[in-house]
Every structure is written in structure tokens, then in C-alpha cells.
Amino acid sequence: MTVQLAPSLLSADFAELGAAVRLVQGGGADLIHLDVMDGHFVPNITIGPAVVRAVRQVAAVPLDVHLMISEPDRYLHAFVEAGAAMLSVHVEALPHLHRTLQAIKALGARAGVALNPSTHPTAIEEVAGEADFVLVMSVNPGFAAQRFIPRTPRKIAAVRALLDAAGNPAPIEVDGGIDTETAGLVTAAGARILVAGNAIFGAADPVGAMRGIRAAAEAAVPATAR
């Protein structure tokens, strides 16, 4: 498979996170996505290292942890120690992004850069060769079940061009409003890791929803990229 699917626990029942993880793993999830929000960088508060550690105990696939927080440098070690295999930080929150990416790698996790919808792709140009992946937000971060921003595919294509110019094959991840209608749009533009929350956990048949999203995404990947 050329596309990875990362169900987002932000849309799951927090009283049944273990069951949610087992369900999506059984449905073929490649990653488990966890959104960390501090009520400062984004207008919501979610989870910390303790929840990541608890999820790690039941997860058989890597944990993809997205830090939507101010001063992420203070918490890198705590989240990697708790079980994060992938850790993304926002370019908007960091004055020394290169140093932060190196610190994440030194801890043994994959280092990702996240971009808010209003942030131009050139914001990561100087670290395009350093990132292990780039997370493009296709909604304004903070809450689940938001509508996909239509300009996102153009932004994904621009990020792909930056990475290619730097000789970096790092994948592009996209988060927000991903469903069977938008999955093909983002993979055609160059995304290869799809985060989906409400489209999975809000569905009557979450596993069937996962299959539909994956099928739509895979069908849109250019033949030359398969």
C-alpha cells in the first residue's frame, strides 16, 4: 500500500480508548494519531503523556503524536518516553525549528513539521531537508469534525515540491476533514499519510469507513508513484 491511514483518537470515545484502538487496528490502521492541545496554542485542551503511555500499552502500531502546544521543546522527552514513534511540532510555535527537529531525532522518534492553514509552505524551506515528514493541516487546529479547506491540495503540492527540491523523500501527512470525498484529492496532490477522525469514529461502521477512505486514497495515487 502506498497510503498510510492514521485514525485520530480525538474523535473516539475517551472512556473507551482501548477499545477504539483495538477496533481500528483490526480494521488495518497503519498508525494511531493523537492530538495534544494545551488551550493556548489552540483553543482546546486534550491529553498529555499519561494518556499516550496508556494507549501505547494497547497499540500494536506506531503512535503518531501531534503537539499543538506552546513551548513544545519542554515536553519532547516526556512524549517520546511515553511511546510516541512520530512527533510533529508546529513551525508557528518554534523560533529554533531546526534544533527542535534534531532533538526529536536524538530521542529516537521521527521528527515532523506541522503547518497551520494560513502558514505558507516556504516557512519550512530551510528545514525541508531535515524533516522526517510534514503535516499539513487541512482545517484550523483545535477541534474535530471540521470542514476540509478546499485550497489544501495546492498547498500539499507546494510542500511536495519543496521536499523534492531538497532531495527529501519524506512523506506528507494531512489532517482535517478527511473522508471518502477528500482522500483522493490529497493523495493526488502528494499526501501519503491520512489522518481521519470523525469520518471513522463517527460512522456506524468505522472499519467499513476506513476501507472506503483507503480505497479512495489509493485509487487517486498517480500510477508513477505506486
Image: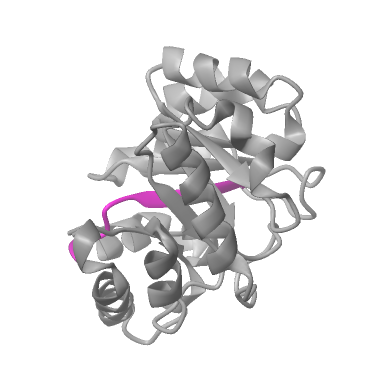
Instruction: Please give left or right for residue 88 compared with residue 222 in the image.
Output: right
Residue at horizontal 46 percent and vertical 49 percent from the top: 160
Q: Nearer the viewer, residue 157 or 17?
A: 157
Visible in this render: residue 34?
no
Quadrant location, the C terminus: bottom left
Magenta span of residues: 26-36
Q: Residue furthest front?
A: 165
Residue 119 image position (x, y, % from top left): 73, 50
Quadrant location, the N terminus: bottom left
Residue at horizontal 53 percent and vertical 49 percent from the top: 159
Q: Nearer the viewer, residue 52 or 137?
A: 137
Q: Nearer the viewer, residue 211 or 204?
A: 211
> Which image quadrant for residue 219?
bottom left
Q: Residue furthest bottom?
A: 204
> Which image quadrant for residue 53?
top left
> Which image quadrant for residue 206?
bottom left
Instruction: Please give left or right for residue 120 compared with residue 23 in the image.
Output: right
Instruction: Please give left or right for residue 41 compared with residue 199 in the image.
Output: right
**Residue 79 is inside the magenta segment:** no
Residue 73 image position (x, y, % from top left): 65, 21
